[in-house]
Image (tube, rainbow, N blue to C red):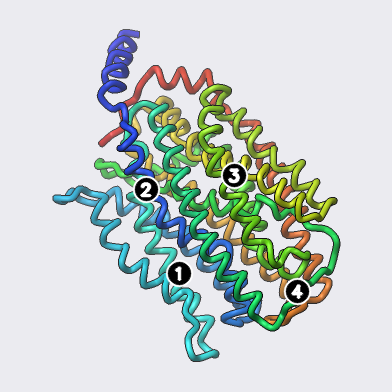
Amino acid sequence: MFLKPALCSLCSQTHLEQKLSVCSKLCFAIGGAPNQVAGSATAFFLQIYLLDVAQINPFQASMVLFIGKAWGAVSDPIVGFFVTKSRWTKIGRLMPWMVGCTPFVVVSYFYLWFVPPFTNGRFIWYLGFYCLYQTLITCFHVPYSALTMFLSTDQRERDSATAYRMTMEVLGTLIGAAIQGQIVASAHTLKHCHHHNVSSGHLGNSSGAEVIRSLALSQDFLSHAVQKPIPFHEGFVLVMKHGPYLILTAAFLFISVAIQLVQSNFVLFCTYAVDLRDHFQNIVLTILMSAAVSIPFWQWFLQRFGKKTAAFCGITWIMPFTVMLVFIPNLVVAYVVAVSSGLSVAASLLLPWSMLPDVVDDFRLANPNSKGHEAIFYSFYVFFTKFAAGISLGVSTLCLEFAGYDTGACRQPHAVAYTLKLLIGAAPVAFIITGLMILLLYPISEDVRRQNKLLCLKPEI
């Protein structure tokens, strides 16, 4: 009782001292954009590149994608743990990680898109460089993402900085999709396969969900840098016992699986299942532009109506429009759905990373004697979502093999087109519904969040 006035006084003082300027938010946000340029190209086009350019068989492609994603998922908590143990230098604790790994990220990314002159060892080539790329990009985003909790003690300021970052990352994703999309579209036009594969009149769930996972994975909010060393296994057990964290992670795990399924199969779907081969890159750009414009709206919406309400309104918004596109496979409808789906893209991008700091604050209140566990929250959240996404990506590519996918062929069997429709349509919708049902159990309402905010637990620096 006697501590509350002091805490609230500290809260008011800290709020005034740590209010972020627009320049500070922009400088923080710009750091996330370059990675998304590369990340969107990898997320959208790596699968079709491995199958139709590198020409490795679907089973090998599925192994590259699954093992690479699994490797990246495992590296998240490991790198996050080592970042927490880093010593301070003249340029800080986090900057050496970002500066040191950047040149190697560039090299690994270049060779990921390079076709070696040999054919027998291509599987090992792409597996090795994809795993290396995943590890190095994790080494960059762990320290970069760890800055979020330390920008300010005011949750509104952290949410605002997150919105700035999401906007810049959407723009980075937009640039990456635009450049790589035009290259892929041009390659499709120049190849000998000029005619469309119209295996069916259904368009599937292609107008927005294909971007959600790319944006969601762009939020590598991994580990949180802390000074005090803690036993890793003890921290893990405490975090895994915290109910709100488990519910939030489980909900967005299912949503991430849906995102991965649609986004990774989108180009193949347009190429071999429907008559949108010449338009997929423009549909992607439409979705991303709509998402970039609508992020400020969702930032206002979550402050006005609450984060949980915003999550349901934003993510469910995509469902009626995708159903409409399934039954009305028309190009004009596709663009209308793309604009509408951009709203859901922005919501799914912004909200998980705005809700996770609330979970960390709730944990601090519930465990006042346990300090320095923030790294485990962020890194294991991404571990679970990445691992699930990797499994779904590997399984979806295996499904194409079982359906009879013919590497390098102009036309694919009807079973492949049917499989792509299931991967784009029915399966993602089922996963999204499951995730939203779990999110109903999320206990941190706006009243709880405001109550936690009044206690103003200052994060360790």
Residue type at mark 2? Ile
**The quadrant where residue 339 appears:** top right
Tag 2, which secondary structure?
Answer: helix
**The quadrant where residue 273 appears:** bottom right
Q: CA distance from mark 4 to mark 3?
A: 36 Å
The x, y position of residue 261, in whole percent, is 66, 58
Q: CA distance from mark 3 to mark 1?
A: 32 Å
Left or right of 122? Residue 77 is left
Q: State the mark number for residue 30.
A: 2
Work out whether residue 373 can be spotted. Answer: no
Q: Earlier in the sequence, mark 1 or mark 2?
A: 2
Mark 4 or mark 3: which is in front? 3
Mark 4 or mark 2: which is in front? 2
Residue tagged by mark 4? 402
Residue tagged by mark 1? 131
Q: Earlier in the sequence, mark 4 or mark 2?
A: 2
Marks 2 and 3 close (CB-CB < 8 Å): no
Query: Which of 74 and 115 lies nearest the eye of the viewer?
Result: 115
Work out whether residue 277 can be spotted. Answer: yes
| Crowd around label 1: few <14 · some 14–19 · many ≥20 (10 Å) | many
Up-down relation of residue 67 to residue 81 (above or below): below
What residue appears at the point 42 percent right and 59 percent down from the top-left corner?
Answer: 75
Q: CA distance from mark 1 to mark 2?
A: 26 Å
What residue appears at the point 60 percent right and 73 percent down from the top-left corner?
Answer: 186
Tag 4, which secondary structure?
Answer: helix
